[in-house]
Image (tube, rainbow, N blue to C red):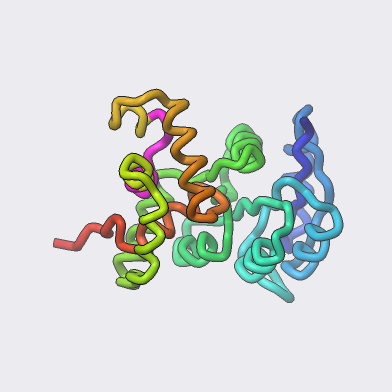
């Protein structure tokens, strides 16, 4: 199955470089390009890509708002945000906007193509380093949506336990080891959690777990 990708970045050189790397893969096709957030939204609607590589700092409409509009409109494309270390303050906002993962602009070609495949498969690309920054942001904001805790009533005890582990940044394999269950069983639990809570992917599950107070950000000593 060919993965169709839309590249959204205001720098032509970066778009062209990403396009060359992606087009070299037998299972990836570059469906189109966008030079700003507005074009990204419009072309996602028109071209229906599987994955949108989204820069954050773009003219007309920034990547955060473009991501928000794409997800709110229920468009098919999963958003993979292109970021740099100096954009850490946007991690929380991008996840809340509906991004499915993050990719550093200095990532290797293999990391880029693997990231596209992970997001296209419906998984979230949420590395432990990103999870730590997300936790720090929740600690800074101190925001907990207490009323939303009622959503946990939809989950079984085991599903709640798995959600807690997801919020800790653990992979399916790591959760399986910690809970002493099969990895396929973990995958089943994750799928049910996302369905019951009406979430797009693991990234949204992490956000919700912290917002409802299921897990607490560590306190500074």
Q: Position of residue 7 (x, y in %)?
A: 74, 52
Q: Is residue 34 left or right of residue 92?
A: right
Give the residue at x 58% y 36%. Answer: 111
- Residue 61 makes an appearance in the image: yes
Q: Does the magenta run of residues contain 170?
A: yes
Q: Is residue 34 above or below residue 162?
A: below
Quadrant in the picture for residue 24: top right
Q: Is residue 150 magenta?
A: no
Residue 112: give x, y in percent of width and height. Answer: 62, 39
Q: Quadrant of residue 149?
A: bottom left
Q: Is residue 131 above or below residue 36?
A: above
Residue that appears at 57% across and 65% down:
97
Q: Is residue 154 above or below residue 26?
A: below
- Name the one closer to the observer, 60 or 213: 213
**Region in magenta:** 164-173
Q: Residue at x 76, y 64 (%)?
A: 41
> Magenta-highlighted stretch: main secondary structure?
helix
In the displayed structure, does residue 38 sit left or right of residue 99? right
Question: Residue 161, position in %: x, y?
Answer: 31, 43
Residue in the image at 66% along x and 41% along y: 120
């Amino acid at each position: 199955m060919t993965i169709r990708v839309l590249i959204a970045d205001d720098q032509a050189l970066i778009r062209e470089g990403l396009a060359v790397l992606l087009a070299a893969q037998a299972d990836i096709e570059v469906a189109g390009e966008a030079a700003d957030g507005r074009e990204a939204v419009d072309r996602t609607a028109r071209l229906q890509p599987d994955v949108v590589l989204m820069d954050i700092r773009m003219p007309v409409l920034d990547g955060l708002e473009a991501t928000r509009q794409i997800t709110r409109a229920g468009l098919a494309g999963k958003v993979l945000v292109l970021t740099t270390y100096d954009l850490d303050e946007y991690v929380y906002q991008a996840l809340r906007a509906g991004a499915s993962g993050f990719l550093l602009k200095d990532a290797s070609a293999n990391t880029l193509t693997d990231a596209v495949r992970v997001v296209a498969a419906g998984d979230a690309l949420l590395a432990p380093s990103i999870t730590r920054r997300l936790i720090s942001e929740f600690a800074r904001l101190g925001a907990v949506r207490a009323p939303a805790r009622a959503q946990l009533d939809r989950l079984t005890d085991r599903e709640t336990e798995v959600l807690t582990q997801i919020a800790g940044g653990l992979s399916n394999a790591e959760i399986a080891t910690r809970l002493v269950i099969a990895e396929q069983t973990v995958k089943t639990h994750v799928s049910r959690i996302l369905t019951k809570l009406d979430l797009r992917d693991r990234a949204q599950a992490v956000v919700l777990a912290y917002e409802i107070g299921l897990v607490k950000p560590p306190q500074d000593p």
